[in-house]
Image (spheres, helix red, strand yellow):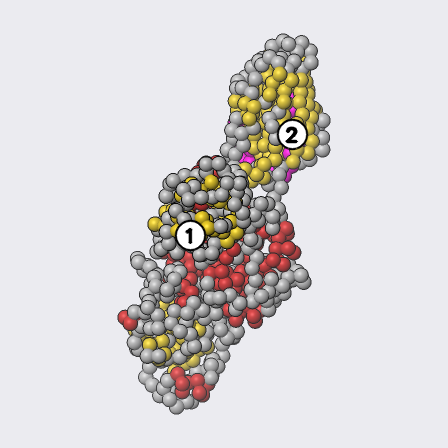
Amino acid sequence: MRLGFTGGGGQGTGLNLTLSNLTLGVAAVEGDDVADWESSNGTSPFTDVLQSEVLHWYFEYGGIHYFVEGVTDYGQYVDGTTWVTVTSGTLSEYSPAKTTNGGDNVNGVMLNPQRGIAQGWDERLDSYSSGLNESLPVTIVVDDILIFSSHEADISAGNRDGVTDEYTPLFVVSSAPASNSMPPAVAGWSGRSTFTEHVFDVDTVVAALPAYSATSVDNPTFTELMDHLDKYNPIVGMTHQASGDGYEVLFPHLFGDNTGTPHNYGQYVARTIGAGMMALLLDAYTTPQKREIALRICQIGLNAYDSLIGDSATIGADGGHHQYLLGPICAYLTWTGQTAALATLKDDIGTNCLEQPFQIDASFIAAAVPHDSATGPCTWRRRTIPAGGVTGLDITFPVFYNGTNSDNFRLRIIGMKIVRESDSAEATITAMPNGFVTKEETNLVATIDAQPGTDFAAGDVIYFESLYSLVDGNYDWGVRTVSRPSWYVPNSGADYRGTNFWTPPYLFLQHLGVSDSDFDAFYGYVEAANSGSFPAEDPFPNHHDTFNSDAFAETMWDEHKETIAPTASFPVIESFASSVTETASTSHTVNMPSGITSGDFLVMCYRGAIDNINTPSGWSAFAHVGNTMLLLYKVATGSEGATLAVTSPGTTKATFVTMRVSNQSGLSGVEKNESSDENGPLLTPSWGSKKTLWLSFYSCRRSDQTITIPSGYTFVDDAVNVSTPTSGNSCQLVVGQLENEATSENPGVHTIVGTISNDRTFTIGIEPA
């Protein structure tokens, strides 16, 4: 007797059958193979009685049909893929059956595929290994995985649109998996012994998704989207080779966007997955449709992440290739309760999104000068114009290529400046008539807009300079990460800069609440590039792109970005007050800033003539310099009055400035440095570059000086003892502020006119909310 089961979540077919709805019937049929079964029953889930001593099961998923003997139990994972338990299991037949195309074997079936490029599905590819193409019958045991394929007949070997129409998995398990569990990753690795399955409560996840209006969003239809996304893809975890028979060839045919060429290049795969992620956030799709989309997104993330982690493999940044993985991996980890893994994802996995963008710092700027290093930024490398190297406006210059060091092999410098080192004469490069470095050239040609006052000539030492200045704290992009600065090209037209489709993962990860610090550069760069005016001198291309010509990413950004990820703003000093104790005393009345409500962040700076103060109840001492300058803070309870009574151990004149600060991240978001002179000290807070509010406090004994706050700072308030100003028993305090998005801040010198006595300074940074 042969039993039949039509399984799957409808990948490739749109069919969604669950076991609870499965009806088994009986029908007498002659024959003994898949064709006989289908001719009598089609793909309907009915049993077929046939004279046989062996119990067979018929399964269908993604358009591929197969018979398995020895099944004792079966079912579906939450994503619709099939699991079975067996005693002595055998794959006896499948359809489309193994055949040939131009004399090459196709439609192979693999048992327990491993990470790597070798495959047994399709002999048209150089990656084919006949030993991996299983011959029927195939014996299966617990923890085996079978992967079937059906080939794309009209595609020649090596085509980057994909040579396989569909893949179908079958998982052999020891017992029925937990309800709502996802299957294990398909691609195995050395040392893998048993399956790992994670529960994905897809219905709860989908119920909690937002439903932003699609009225102004140019989004694809569900059918249009699923024509691409609804194809099982084990290759995301199997290989990340990006040339020859790499992922583009092995991905399902036309998995990527229809309008991109080649269709399965990373940028165009990112369009498909990006459209799926955005669909989950819009009201244009029904709950059942979102359920199917979420399952495919999770399926991709699972197959990529688990196989990579199991194999201790990372994906280096590489052009526009593997950008499509970050969103699905983060979704999978978030939806299956593995959020702790997000904190180490950059080191564990990599991907373009986390490795290519970076934040410029002082050390990087210091390296961006003319040099002779093979590892320094290639555009600033000194080059000597060879004999005969100037013809009109065409300048010939030497290039250097030796693998990981020196020139980017796609040295696109159009729009940059060519500078003669001896006199800083410069011109703008308008074209590169001979193209880029292709690993064989020793010279290239750059066409300039005009010769400078003294023409460029053979023997001139030149280098290339960007149109925009490198600014500490700004974000930029490098094709092979900042760790390989020799390939960094600082211009908007840098090769591959415009091939990254990062708007959808940005919005989706913000929706998921992914906020680990390793994501800061990715978020910061996308925000800057999508502003349309950064950097002002040479604006970067945005990361919107399209899906099948639908401008859904750009319209989604325009309509809903501020709701999903409000633009960060600087902390704000909402109000402030100053106080002075003119007569030395142990009791001091401190004026409080106006408008205090519960939860406000309060800052108090004290400067005394000869003694410190006792910390008031509810306040925390944050920093001090010597025994006469103290910084305190608290989170307001709302019960604060207009004044605060403060005491000191001994009698002293005193000055105070208090502030109420909004849009800040709390007690952990304040850091400081102090100094015993008029030079505001350098501060490098732990949170990196954010819209930080920097405060510079200066104080001294005597109060007859004129104090000017550091350049760039705005005056906030001061407090000055006016009695006996020339006495060392008097004091004064002044506060300035600066809004600056940078990794560090060094306020510099307070200018003092008059006698300096016992001066002290604080620099503090307040992190935005």
Residue 687 horizontal/vertical position (percent): 52, 38
Quadrant where the N terminus lies?
Answer: bottom left
Q: Which residues are magenta?
A: 656-673
**Residue type at tag 2:** Thr
Q: Quadrant of the C terminus?
A: top right
Q: Residue at x 62, y 53 (%)?
A: 561
Horizontal and vertical percent position of residue 560: 63, 55
> What residue is shown at x 42% (from left), y 62% (from top)?
236
The disc placed on residue 444 is: 1
Q: Residue at x 37, y 64 (%)?
A: 244
The reply to whether the magenta stretch includes residue 658 is yes
Q: Where 729 falls versus 357 (above or below)?
A: above
* 406 or 230, nearer to the observer: 406
| Disc 1, SS | strand
Q: Decide whether the magenta segment is chiefly helix, strand or loop.
A: strand
Q: Position of residue 586 (x, y in %)?
A: 63, 14
Q: In the picture, residue 31 is in which quadrant?
A: bottom left
Residue 249: image tag: none
The residue to which callout 2 is attached is 714
Q: Is residue 111 left or right of residue 281?
A: left
User: How many numbered circles are shown?
Assistant: 2
Secondary structure at badge 2 equals: strand
